[in-house]
Image (cartoon, grey):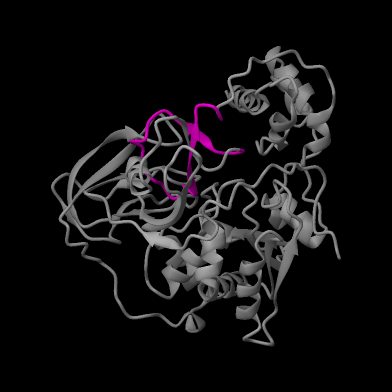
Amino acid sequence: MINFSFYGGIHPEDSKTGTSAKKILNLRPPKKAIIPLQQHTGAVCEPLVKIGDIVKVGQKIGDTKTFVSAPVHATISGKVIDISPMLHPLETKALSIIIESDEADTWAIEETKRDWKTLKQEEIKHIVREAGVVGLGGAAFPTHVKLSPPENKKIDTYILNGAECEPFLTADHRLMLEYAEQVVIGLKILMKATGVKKGIIGIERNKPDAFRKIADEINKEPDLNIDVISLKVKYPQGAEKQLIKALLKREVPSGELPMDVGAIVSNVGTSFAVYESVVERKPLVERIVTVTGKGVRNPQNLRVRIGTPFSNLIEACGGAKEEAGKIIMGGPMMGIAQYTADVPVIKGTSGILVQTKNEVCDKPEECCIRCGNCASVCPMKILPNVITNSIKNERFEDAKEYGLLDCMECGACAYVCPANIPIVKYIKYGKTRLKK
């Protein structure tokens, strides 16, 4: 068997059995939706509505003329009751549009389906842009930008990431099982938009049922130039550069992007969102979120409206247990700890992990013993211990020379560190200081 893998990486317990067999459930739209104007990589949107306006689901309520950005839409119908800074899962606060539901759930989109095969490349890009589609794997990079590489970048392969290597999360797994047809059509649309003739869907070997579903869908068209490949189970298999290395055996050089080696990578959730925007005429107003962990009573995969408070999702899963001690947006490796459950679901919310107090690491940081464990598992082949030491000593240019900016903050180094050094915390601090 070909070893579809990459250098370094770790094998944490996947902890996916709690939700991997649970079908996606639709969560009731919230009575109040908080829509941040910053849910993507790029420029912040400006409000297109004012307090007192009546809006419908799918109506664009925030946008900007900046190319690297993505508009936001109303996710419930009702009245705009406030536009002000609100709690945000990635920032302290962000300017947000607050909508109070009218309970009617009236949509602003046409119900007729669109034939994507008749659309031109620029038409697809425009539709995707207007629908506010971004990368749903976590980075939330605007998809229309990714579909518009410079003319001198010759793209030959479009890759869909179905690895979902982060422990606990199963949203992508369930999506591939329940919406395989839409995911594959989404990839076809992405390939047409970029003029790419070759497509690959990479799925980790711990999801054989999803692999079969996707393969069956692809096999319906014998001449379809799309392959589904079974990847070695290893974290962070789903990272762009690691996925390209595993599937294409190409190395993305330091400081460069996937398009520099002829590839574009999107998440399977993004492909589904592209299908919905292009075929169903539906903007990105909802997404699938895994709510899981030992601290929640009944873990589930939920389809939820963007802007729904985390507390609504946790309550829909039976509520948090008494011993719950920590809430994380995302998974345990790259997720962001939250200080409140009152933050809203945003486009990049793939999961909500509720940990118990016993799971929360409170061991004191010790001195680095230079064991080299962090370097041996680093998928970017940098020296996390040397970078961390440079940052501790305020030598940020030295940290940069040792690969600070190449770090993707996967957390593999901190996972294996016997001294309990929060390496990723230092890395983030170093990047912030370097920017300043």
Give x and y (percent) for residue 187: 58, 71
Q: Is residue 376 left or right of residue 415?
A: right
Residue at the location (62% across, 86% down)?
220
Residue 432, horizontal then vertical, whole percent: 58, 26
Q: Quadrant of the C terminus?
A: top right
Q: Can the viewer see residue 152 in this picture? A: no
* 384 vs 25: above or below: above
Residue stretch rendered in magenta on the structure: 333-359
Q: Is residue 347 magenta?
A: yes
Horizontally, residue 387 falls left or right of residue 123, namely right
Q: In the image, is residue 376 above or below residue 257?
A: above
Establish if 126 lies above or below 181. above
Q: Is residue 311 magenta?
A: no
Residue 259 appears in the rendering: yes
The N terminus lies in which quarter of the figure?
A: bottom right
Left or right of residue 373: residue 116: left
Residue 216, quarter of picture: bottom right
- 294 in relation to 49, above or below: above
